[in-house]
């Protein structure tokens, strides 16, 4: 199943020229940032076969990542660090990352379409769409940009902290990752407010 451009097309037909899609990745991992992306697609150059990033292979995501960057009218990326997640909580950090992604756009959207049911407060109208990353082209594009960006960030953290295997699991709580935390303790990239770190170690 691929996303379509009907939501954006309706808004454009009603006079909203720039529609951004927003999605995030990284709410659940035990380490690393939460990353959000905002994408304003060009109605005349929509990449083929956009879909929820979770349904795409890694090579396909990489191809679409480059295509989106080349063809979109604007792309913005925002993140919230593990320290911010611990300080704010994951929900507030996610909303912060989404807001930062929209603020990073080089063009100001007249409407923002956000995946899920918990949109951030923005200076423009915003519509939350449950399952939007599978339905709406601009949100699907944002999911791909966010996923590839975060995976690359986690690969770099894996080079800095090789004991944890971040490049393999992107910080999610796999058995090997939990075993590494138990053996080595957490590193600065970990979320100390998340189990199994919470209550055992302090930052």
Image: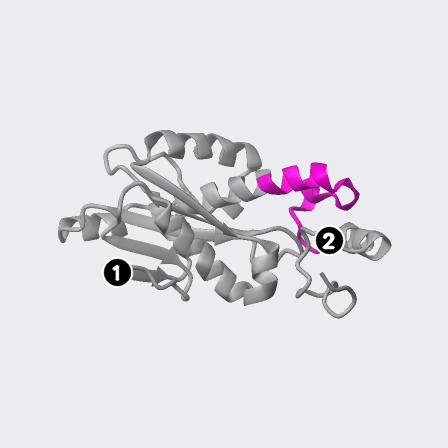
Judge the density around disc 2: few (<14), some (14-19), many (≥20) Cα neighbours within 10 Å: some
* Residue at the (63%, 55%) spot, across then down: 29
Magenta stretch: includes residue 147: no
Q: Considering only vertical position in the picture, is 194 above or below 11?
A: below
Could you give the CA–CA distance between mark 1 and mark 2, rounded to whole angstroms? 39 Å
Q: Is residue 123 visible?
A: yes
| Residue 142 quadrant | top left
Q: Position of residue 116 (x, y in %)?
A: 42, 61
Label whose residue precedes the other's in the sequence (1 or 2):
1
What secondary structure characterizes most of the magenta part?
helix
Q: Kindly state the secondary structure of the residue where label 2 is placed.
A: loop
Q: Which residue is mark 2?
A: 174
Identify the residue at the far right of this view: 183
Assess whether residue 163 is covered by the magenta stretch: yes
**Residue 89 visible from this viewpoint:** no
Measured as percent of width and height from the top left, residue 145 is found at: 46, 41
């Amino acid at each position: 199943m691929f996303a379509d451009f009907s939501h954006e097309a309706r808004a454009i037909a009603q006079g909203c020229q720039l529609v951004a899609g927003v999605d995030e990745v990284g709410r659940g991992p035990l380490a690393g940032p939460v990353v959000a992306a905002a994408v304003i697609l060009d109605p005349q150059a929509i990449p083929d076969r956009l879909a929820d990033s979770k349904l795409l292979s890694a090579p396909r995501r990489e191809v679409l990542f480059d295509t989106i960057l080349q063809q979109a009218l604007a792309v913005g990326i925002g993140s919230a660090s593990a320290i911010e997640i611990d300080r704010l909580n994951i929900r507030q950090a996610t909303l912060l990352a989404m807001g930062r992604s929209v603020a990073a756009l080089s063009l100001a959207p007249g409407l923002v379409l956000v995946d899920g049911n918990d949109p951030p407060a923005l200076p423009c109208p915003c519509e939350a769409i449950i399952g939007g990353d599978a339905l709406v082209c601009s949100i699907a594009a944002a999911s791909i940009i966010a996923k590839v960006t975060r995976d690359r960030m986690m690969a770099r953290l894996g080079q800095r902290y090789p004991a944890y295997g971040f490049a393999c699991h992107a910080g999610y709580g796999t058995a090997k990752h939990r075993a590494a935390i138990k053996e080595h303790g957490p590193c600065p990239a970990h979320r100390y407010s998340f189990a199994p770190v919470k209550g055992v170690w302090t930052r």
